[in-house]
Image: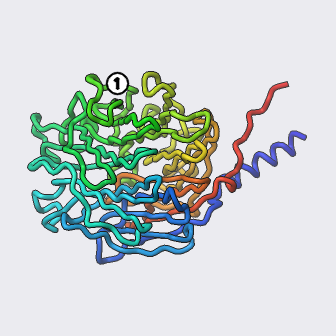
Amino acid sequence: MKNTLLLVVTLLLYINSLGQFKNIKLLEQDDQGYPPVEPSITINKKNTKNIVAAAVLDWVIVSNDGGETWNKSHLKSPSGVYGDPALISNFKGHLFYFHLADPSGKGRSDDAWLDRIVCHTSEDEGATWNEGVTIGNNPPADQDKAWPAIHPKRNSVYVTWTQFDKYGSSDSTCHSNIMFSKALFGNKFSKAISINETPGDCLDKDDTTEGAVPAVGNDGKIYVAWANHGKIYFDRSYDDGNTWLSNDLLITKQEGGWDLDIPGIQRSNGLPVLTIDNSASRFQGTLYLLWADQKNGTNNTDIWLMRSRNRGDYWSKPLRINKDEGEHHQFFPWITVDQTNGNVYIVYYDRRNYNDSRTDVYLAYSFDGGNTFDEMKISDEPFIPDASKFFGDYTNIDAHGGIITPIWTRMDNGRTSVWTSVIKEKDLPKPTAPIKKK
């Protein structure tokens, strides 16, 4: 009996180590444009067959048949398009594409680079996009790392990002702050306001105030988390973003900071990601905070999750998502909640299967409000990144109606490509129930 049980467990572990879902290549690097990195993806909340992805610098990749086929195009903007794409869909099926601007067309060689955030809207499932509206233009300050959120019941769009007095400056008087703006239908955004209490520096490293990701509850309350000086902070607004807490709430330490050293990765951030359960499940209202850090050592980066069920007043103890033993790196995590059922999904890179820089992609999932997670490898083959080449700053994932769409970058021989997988909840291995002691 024991031998049979051991065989079953071994077989399950073996199956779990294999990529079980079709990997779909969306983009690959050529010799003409900027290497595709920093992918974002959203499922149309009115039509789950419509899946839209984006990647640096200006890519739009659209599927209207649930991921069977994809059409590629380039986004255009009078302000220029210069990366950091972030996609989101509202409940009416309107799509929003946020990105950095490049009004001069000269990129980093011009001071106008990073002078604003731009938001485009599509009302025809990503086939066409309006010319976009600008957000936060405040010269000579620089704007970076924007991420949006949608009101689950109204047509309001919210966005947070980092404003640098001067990006990359080592001047001690140069500060970075978290900015907030909102718009009805995404048409005209409000004047940006700073919501953080303590500023950071401008070096785009551990002591920079960065990584703001907003989340909006069914009641319209807005929540934001970010990293600064080796800590993760939290703020909230109960009046549609007009006023915020006078004192930011310190949620947890981020050991080793957010600017992590990962072999083979030019830069790897462990910036926090915040989301909320707005489903009708029994976990409705739960806030989920995800990040990566090196509290277990510089050779052992891990993914961590905390939860709050009282609007951020109290948070659970950090739960380690990756279940590997020994020293391995897990990094670049992202989290989403399927708002039709409350299931939680996390995507991240993982090196548990090797003693070198070979890298897999894993999916962790929870069907019990983040109390427990199962995880599995979803990439077909490992890849080896090259630290001399830029790999981007994030992955992404969306889920809706039992469909899960992780998206990631891989690098082969120094060349990047962007991949996704369209996964059905019903095809995931069911969570393993704990063994009851007799």
Residue that mark 1 sits on = 249
- Its colouring scheme is rainbow
Question: x and y percent of residue 34 in the render?
Answer: 29, 69
Check the image and report above or below for 112 versus 32: above
Give the amino acid at mark 1. Answer: Leu
Question: x and y percent of residue 390 in the render?
Answer: 32, 59
Check the image and report above or below for 394 versus 77: above
Residue 300 visible at all: no
Residue 69 visible at all: yes
Q: Residue at x 29, y 66 (%)?
A: 130
Question: x and y percent of residue 90 in the render?
Answer: 43, 53
Give the secondary structure at mark 1: strand
Q: Is residue 40 left or right of residue 131?
A: right
Task: Name the foreground residue: 57 vs 304.
Answer: 57
Question: x and y percent of residue 75 in the render?
Answer: 31, 69
Task: Name the foreground residue: 219 vs 126.
Answer: 219
Q: Quadrant of the C terminus?
A: top right
Q: Quadrant of residue 219?
A: top left
Q: Residue at x 87, y 45 (%)?
A: 4
Q: Quadrant of residue 273?
A: top left
Q: Residue at x 49, y 70 (%)?
A: 63
Q: Residues within 10 Å of mark 1 (few under 14, many from 20)?
A: some
